Structures are given as C-alpha cells and as structure tokens.
Image: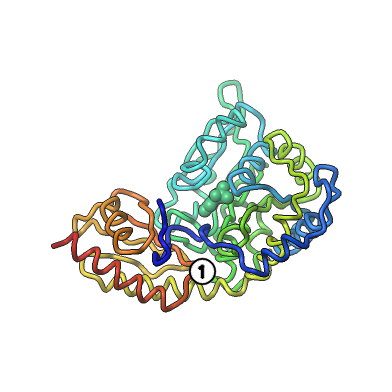
Amino acid sequence: MDIDEDTIDLRSDTVTTPSDEMREAARDAEVGDDVYRDDPTVNELERRAAEAVGTEAALYVPSGTMANQIAVHVHTEPGQELLLERESHVYRWELAGASNLSGLQTRTIDAGERCVPSPDAVAEGLVSEDLHRPGTGLLSLENTHNFRGGTAIPVDGIAAAAEAARDADVPVHLDGARVFNAAVALGVDASELVAPVDSVTFCLSKGLGAPVGSILAGDEEFVEEARRVRKLFGGGMRQAGIIAAPGLLALENVDRLAEDHANAERLAAGLDAVDGVDAPAPDTNIVVAHTEDAGIPAADLVEACKAAGVGCVEFDEHTTRFTTHLDVDADDVAVAVDRIGDAVAELSG
Ligand SMILES: *Cc1c(COP(=O)(O)O)cnc(C)c1O
C-alpha cells in the first residue's frame, strides 16, 4: 500500500526508516569483502550480536526468514521431521521453506493461547527414528510470539519446552525475531531466554530500527556451518559493512523498546474502549484487535483504517494487528486511536 505522509503506519515495526545517525554510519563504515571475512564492520556486528544474546558466535544475514531457514537446514537431515508450534512464523509465513529448502516434513503442536508448548506436548510431538518413522530433527520455538500478539514467553516456559526436546537428543532453535522485546518486557537479559536453546534468530530490522538484516547465533561449530549454508542460500554478501553499521547502532536501541511497549499498552487501552473492539493488553509492541462481536471483518477494518490514515494488517478473519515502533510516539498513538475509532464507528453504523 502507498503510505501518505500523514498516515500513522502501524502495519509493522519493520516500517521504520534509518535515523540520520544510521545513514552517517553507513556512509562512513569501514568495509571489506565479507565472504572473505574481511569486513571489519560486519565482524564487529557479529561479535557484539553474539555478546547481546550470550552465544559463542553469530552470523549476519539479510533477513529473519533466511536466519530461520539456515538454522532449520543446519540442524536437520532431509527426510526428518521439524516440530513446531502451529501458529509459528516458521510454519505459517515462510513459504514452506522447511520442505522447500531442507526436505523436511513438519509436525505441529497446538500450544494454546500463549503459544508456549508444554513439555508434554513437545514429548508427544517427537518422533523417534525406526523402520517406518523419520525421526524429529529439530524443535523450533518462537519468542515473542507474533501471531498471538507479541506474547513474551518467560525463561521457564522456553527452558521446559527445550528440555523435553533435548532429553530426546533433539536440538532446539528459537525464532527470536523480537527476542529483545521479550527480554525487556520480562525484565531479564536476552541471554537468559537464549541459554536453553541451541540457536537463535533475531531481527535488527524490526523494533531495533536498522534498515536491513538479522542475526543467527549459536556456538562456534553451528555458526561455521551456518556460514556455509548462508552461501548456499545466496546470502553471502560483500561490502556489507554499509548495512551492518546501522545494525551496530540498532543494538543500542534495546532499552528503548520499553517505550514501544508503553505505547502499545496505550493503543490497546484506547481500542478496547471502542464499541465493538476487543483489544487485550499486550505484553510487548504488538496489539491485536478482535472485531468478531461487531461483525467487522479484518479486511474491512484495514481498508477503513487506511482511508482514515492508519496503517495496520489483517491477521485473521476478524483480527487486525497494530504494531508500535520507534517512528511513532504517544501523540501519534492518541491520534491513531481516534482515527481507528471513527473507522470502526463507520463500519458498525
Ligand atoms: C518478522 C519475523 C520473521 C522474519 O523476518 P524477515 O526479516 O521479515 O524475514 C521471522 N519470525 C518472526 C516471529 C517474525 O516476526
């Protein structure tokens, strides 16, 4: 959709544009050929990113989707099963990459409202290898959980699910596209959320505000293999310091995610007060608004919001997602609530 200047764009936290400081950092970045590991800015970003999540090593990749798909590929063999939660991004929104790129069969867990698979659900979903069955190659978890409205899964939830898999010698990947949102909301260090798993994805290009890029992190051996698979998937980049430099600045934006969470809370409270809208208080920066009771389809609400000057996305038949980010402040949120309220009134009337 074309976004005009007055629109308050809450479609995603990916819509932020780089700050002047980021643009200057890009211009001035020291660069080299990163496929030869000669780019000092990328090397520094990978070092600092590993530090931020408490892993031995990290790899800079073009997108969160590529990070997840590299992890899936590294941890598994073709013909195995990938166990994951049924509303997860890896399952729903990555073009069946697990089968397409890694030859896997998926098996899903129904993990309920908050999408934390219980250890029992994980144990039940694991398949051991025998004459007839392929064996589970990987368990993939997600935190924060996008589809469930940015829910922040506590350390013990991740740890218990991961332990159930590791008891069966199955490795665990965490799709932590917004893992720093989870850490800030829970008041823990991101490394605590990552400690129970074998690898983690996080996005620099979402709430942290970088123009491009994600990180895939894990131990040295994992990252070495991930580097080969990144090349296989066409993600080996050359003078990537140009885009890694803003990524380094993005890592400094972790603490300010709390502002996005406060704005999301304001937004949800404002929307929930609108007749016909049910918008539960969010854990982080994602607000989901349900309009089933008012009989308003999400597609209609998205169109009406667009006409009223608010960007949002359809999540489900009667569920619409609004995401706060560093290009919107509390005043924008107040204006957005008014505009969305008008849009809902028009559709209800
Ligand atoms: C955005 C997102 C991704 C994918 O990131 P891209 O950079 O858009 O490819 C993966 N997982 C989750 C949970 C996400 O929200």
Name which residue lies at 67% across and 42% down: 169
* Colour pattern: rainbow
Residue 44 percent location from the top left of the image: 80, 60
Give the quarter of the image for residue 271. Answer: bottom left
Name which residue lies at 80% across and 58% down: 41
- Queried on whether the Cβ of the residue with tag 1 lies below 8 angstroms from ligand 1, the answer reads no
Reading the image, the residue beneath label 1 is: 327
Residue 206 percent location from the top left of the image: 56, 59
Count numbered badges in the picture.
1
SS label for mark 1:
loop
Residue 193 percent location from the top left of the image: 63, 62
Q: What residue type is labelled 1?
A: Asp
Name which residue lies at 44% across and 78% down: 330
Closer-to-camera residue (275/35): 35
Residue 122 percent location from the top left of the image: 53, 46
* Above or below 101: residue 111: below
Alpha-carbon neighbours of circle 1 within 10 Å: few (<14), some, or many (≥20)?
Answer: some
Closer-to-camera residue (122/225): 225
Judged from this view, the residue extending furthest toward the left is 349
> Where, quadrant-wise, is the C terminus in this rendering?
bottom left
Judged from this view, the residue extending furthest toward the top is 131
Closer-to-camera residue (61/149): 61
Name which residue lies at 43% across and 53% down: 147
Closer-to-camera residue (145/308): 308
* Above or below 313: residue 209: below
